[in-house]
Image (tube, helix red, strand yellow):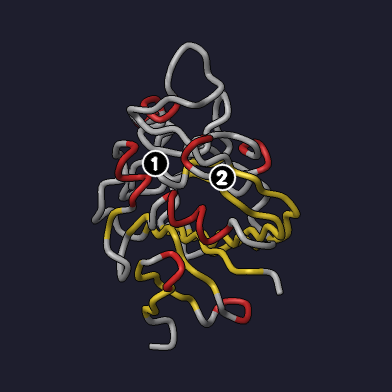
Amino acid sequence: NPSSFIMIHYIGSQVYCDMETDGGGWTVFQRRQDGSVDFYRYWADYENGFGDLTGEFWLGLSKIHRLTKEGSNTLRVDLGDFEGNTTYANYSTFNVSDGSTEYILTVGGYSGTAGDSLAYHNGSRFTTRDNDNDGWLSGNCANERTGAWWYNNSERSNLNGIYQQAQDNHPIFGGNDDGITWQDWKDNYINLKFSEMKTRCNN
Protein backbone atom coordinates (compact mmCIF):
# COMPACT_ATOMS: atom_id res chain seq x y z
CA ASN A 1 0.00 0.00 0.00
CA PRO A 2 1.60 3.32 -1.04
CA SER A 3 -0.10 5.04 1.92
CA SER A 4 1.77 2.97 4.51
CA PHE A 5 3.39 3.88 7.80
CA ILE A 6 6.69 5.64 7.97
CA MET A 7 8.71 6.88 10.91
CA ILE A 8 9.11 10.63 11.18
CA HIS A 9 12.11 10.76 13.47
CA TYR A 10 11.88 14.38 14.51
CA ILE A 11 8.49 13.85 16.17
CA GLY A 12 9.57 10.44 17.45
CA SER A 13 6.48 8.52 16.49
CA GLN A 14 4.92 6.38 13.80
CA VAL A 15 2.55 8.26 11.53
CA TYR A 16 0.20 7.38 8.70
CA CYS A 17 1.23 8.99 5.41
CA ASP A 18 -1.23 9.60 2.59
CA MET A 19 0.84 9.46 -0.60
CA GLU A 20 -2.15 9.59 -2.96
CA THR A 21 -4.46 12.55 -2.24
CA ASP A 22 -3.64 15.72 -4.20
CA GLY A 23 -0.02 14.78 -4.86
CA GLY A 24 0.60 13.01 -1.54
CA GLY A 25 3.05 13.86 1.20
CA TRP A 26 0.35 14.20 3.86
CA THR A 27 0.69 13.17 7.49
CA VAL A 28 -2.76 12.09 8.69
CA PHE A 29 -3.55 13.15 12.26
CA GLN A 30 -7.27 12.33 12.58
CA ARG A 31 -9.58 9.71 11.10
CA ARG A 32 -13.20 8.76 11.82
CA GLN A 33 -14.84 6.01 9.80
CA ASP A 34 -16.80 3.44 11.81
CA GLY A 35 -17.19 4.41 15.47
CA SER A 36 -14.74 1.75 16.68
CA VAL A 37 -12.80 4.23 18.85
CA ASP A 38 -14.28 6.42 21.60
CA PHE A 39 -13.34 10.07 20.98
CA TYR A 40 -15.05 11.49 24.09
CA ARG A 41 -11.79 11.51 26.02
CA TYR A 42 -9.76 13.55 28.46
CA TRP A 43 -6.99 16.07 27.89
CA ALA A 44 -4.11 13.62 28.37
CA ASP A 45 -5.42 11.39 25.57
CA TYR A 46 -5.85 14.29 23.18
CA GLU A 47 -2.40 15.59 24.04
CA ASN A 48 -0.65 12.23 23.58
CA GLY A 49 -2.86 10.54 20.99
CA PHE A 50 -5.03 7.42 20.87
CA GLY A 51 -6.55 4.85 18.52
CA ASP A 52 -5.13 2.75 15.69
CA LEU A 53 -3.26 4.32 12.75
CA THR A 54 -4.87 1.83 10.36
CA GLY A 55 -8.37 2.70 11.61
CA GLU A 56 -9.75 5.50 13.76
CA PHE A 57 -7.24 7.65 15.63
CA TRP A 58 -6.09 11.04 16.88
CA LEU A 59 -2.32 11.47 16.56
CA GLY A 60 -1.98 13.81 19.54
CA LEU A 61 -1.84 17.58 19.96
CA SER A 62 1.82 17.54 21.01
CA LYS A 63 2.71 15.73 17.76
CA ILE A 64 0.49 17.97 15.62
CA HIS A 65 2.33 20.94 17.14
CA ARG A 66 5.69 19.40 16.26
CA LEU A 67 4.51 18.66 12.72
CA THR A 68 3.38 22.25 12.12
CA LYS A 69 5.80 24.42 14.09
CA GLU A 70 8.43 24.66 11.34
CA GLY A 71 7.79 26.76 8.24
CA SER A 72 4.51 26.90 6.37
CA ASN A 73 1.97 24.07 6.34
CA THR A 74 -1.28 23.12 4.63
CA LEU A 75 -4.23 21.41 6.29
CA ARG A 76 -6.59 19.19 4.31
CA VAL A 77 -9.90 17.91 5.69
CA ASP A 78 -11.64 15.11 3.76
CA LEU A 79 -15.27 14.37 4.62
CA GLY A 80 -17.91 11.83 3.59
CA ASP A 81 -21.61 11.47 4.31
CA PHE A 82 -23.91 8.46 4.66
CA GLU A 83 -25.14 8.87 1.07
CA GLY A 84 -21.72 8.34 -0.49
CA ASN A 85 -20.92 12.01 -1.15
CA THR A 86 -17.43 13.33 -0.43
CA THR A 87 -16.01 16.81 -0.07
CA TYR A 88 -12.86 18.54 1.16
CA ALA A 89 -11.50 21.72 2.69
CA ASN A 90 -7.94 22.93 2.13
CA TYR A 91 -6.16 25.55 4.24
CA SER A 92 -2.87 27.00 3.00
CA THR A 93 -2.06 28.27 6.50
CA PHE A 94 -2.12 25.82 9.40
CA ASN A 95 -0.35 25.46 12.70
CA VAL A 96 -1.05 24.42 16.27
CA SER A 97 0.78 26.08 19.17
CA ASP A 98 2.33 24.17 22.06
CA GLY A 99 0.78 22.92 25.29
CA SER A 100 1.68 26.03 27.27
CA THR A 101 -1.00 27.89 25.28
CA GLU A 102 -3.43 24.95 25.04
CA TYR A 103 -2.61 24.19 21.38
CA ILE A 104 -4.10 27.27 19.71
CA LEU A 105 -5.34 26.66 16.16
CA THR A 106 -4.13 29.01 13.43
CA VAL A 107 -5.83 28.35 10.11
CA GLY A 108 -6.52 30.36 6.96
CA GLY A 109 -6.37 30.43 3.18
CA TYR A 110 -9.42 28.23 2.64
CA SER A 111 -10.22 26.58 -0.68
CA GLY A 112 -12.30 23.52 -1.54
CA THR A 113 -15.86 22.26 -1.76
CA ALA A 114 -16.87 21.68 1.88
CA GLY A 115 -17.23 25.30 2.94
CA ASP A 116 -15.06 26.96 5.56
CA SER A 117 -16.15 25.57 8.93
CA LEU A 118 -12.80 26.28 10.62
CA ALA A 119 -12.56 30.08 10.23
CA TYR A 120 -14.84 30.45 13.28
CA HIS A 121 -12.35 28.35 15.27
CA ASN A 122 -9.22 30.24 14.19
CA GLY A 123 -7.33 31.47 17.25
CA SER A 124 -9.16 29.15 19.64
CA ARG A 125 -7.51 26.95 22.25
CA PHE A 126 -8.27 23.24 22.42
CA THR A 127 -10.95 22.08 24.87
CA THR A 128 -11.70 18.63 26.29
CA ARG A 129 -14.28 17.43 28.80
CA ASP A 130 -11.81 18.01 31.65
CA ASN A 131 -9.98 21.11 30.36
CA ASP A 132 -12.30 23.96 29.37
CA ASN A 133 -10.52 26.59 27.25
CA ASP A 134 -13.44 27.67 25.07
CA GLY A 135 -15.15 31.05 24.86
CA TRP A 136 -18.48 29.84 26.25
CA LEU A 137 -18.64 31.33 29.73
CA SER A 138 -21.53 29.30 31.14
CA GLY A 139 -20.34 25.82 30.25
CA ASN A 140 -17.92 23.52 28.45
CA CYS A 141 -18.53 22.96 24.73
CA ALA A 142 -16.72 19.60 24.86
CA ASN A 143 -19.31 18.32 27.35
CA GLU A 144 -22.19 19.91 25.44
CA ARG A 145 -21.06 18.51 22.07
CA THR A 146 -19.64 15.24 23.47
CA GLY A 147 -16.29 15.77 21.80
CA ALA A 148 -13.04 17.72 21.94
CA TRP A 149 -12.12 20.55 19.59
CA TRP A 150 -10.89 24.09 19.11
CA TYR A 151 -14.27 25.35 20.31
CA ASN A 152 -14.94 29.08 20.20
CA ASN A 153 -18.05 30.01 22.23
CA SER A 154 -19.81 27.38 20.13
CA GLU A 155 -18.79 25.48 17.00
CA ARG A 156 -19.09 25.36 13.21
CA SER A 157 -17.36 21.98 13.07
CA ASN A 158 -17.10 19.08 15.51
CA LEU A 159 -15.07 16.31 13.87
CA ASN A 160 -14.28 14.63 17.19
CA GLY A 161 -17.94 14.37 18.22
CA ILE A 162 -19.88 11.14 18.80
CA TYR A 163 -19.81 8.70 15.89
CA GLN A 164 -23.45 8.17 14.97
CA GLN A 165 -24.50 5.20 12.83
CA ALA A 166 -27.06 7.21 10.84
CA GLN A 167 -27.12 10.58 9.14
CA ASP A 168 -30.03 12.38 10.78
CA ASN A 169 -29.48 13.60 14.33
CA HIS A 170 -32.32 16.11 14.55
CA PRO A 171 -34.01 16.73 17.93
CA ILE A 172 -37.39 15.76 16.45
CA PHE A 173 -35.93 12.25 16.18
CA GLY A 174 -34.44 12.43 19.67
CA GLY A 175 -31.05 13.56 18.41
CA ASN A 176 -28.69 16.35 19.33
CA ASP A 177 -25.94 18.35 17.60
CA ASP A 178 -23.17 16.26 19.18
CA GLY A 179 -22.21 14.17 16.14
CA ILE A 180 -19.40 14.55 13.61
CA THR A 181 -20.39 17.78 11.88
CA TRP A 182 -19.12 20.35 9.36
CA GLN A 183 -21.85 22.96 9.28
CA ASP A 184 -20.89 24.73 6.06
CA TRP A 185 -21.42 21.46 4.17
CA LYS A 186 -24.25 19.89 6.21
CA ASP A 187 -26.09 21.46 9.11
CA ASN A 188 -25.28 20.70 12.73
CA TYR A 189 -27.88 17.91 12.93
CA ILE A 190 -26.45 15.95 9.98
CA ASN A 191 -23.83 13.40 11.04
CA LEU A 192 -20.90 12.61 8.78
CA LYS A 193 -19.74 9.06 8.15
CA PHE A 194 -16.07 9.82 7.49
CA SER A 195 -13.50 12.46 8.32
CA GLU A 196 -9.76 12.63 7.86
CA MET A 197 -7.46 15.52 8.77
CA LYS A 198 -3.93 15.71 7.37
CA THR A 199 -1.08 18.18 6.99
CA ARG A 200 2.01 18.71 4.83
CA CYS A 201 4.73 21.32 4.44
CA ASN A 202 4.33 24.00 1.78
CA ASN A 203 7.48 23.73 -0.30
In which quadrant of the rendered image does the N terminus lie?
bottom left
Q: Residue furthest bottom?
A: 1
In which quadrant of the rendered image does the C terminus lie?
bottom right
| Residue at image coords 33%, 50% | 48
Q: Is residue 45 left or right of residue 73?
A: left
Q: Which residue is mark 2?
A: 97
- Element type where label 2 sits in the image: loop
Q: Is residue 2 above or below residue 65?
A: below
Q: Which residue is mark 1?
A: 161
| Viewer-proximal residue among 180 and 7 | 7
Q: Is residue 33 left or right of residue 199?
A: left
Label 1 Cα neighbours within 10 Å, binned few <14 / some 14-19 / many ≥20: many
| Viewer-proximal residue among 5 and 120 | 5
Q: Is residue 41 left or right of residue 119?
A: left
Amino acid beneath label 1: Gly
- Element type where label 1 sits in the image: loop
| Residue at image coords 33%, 58% | 57
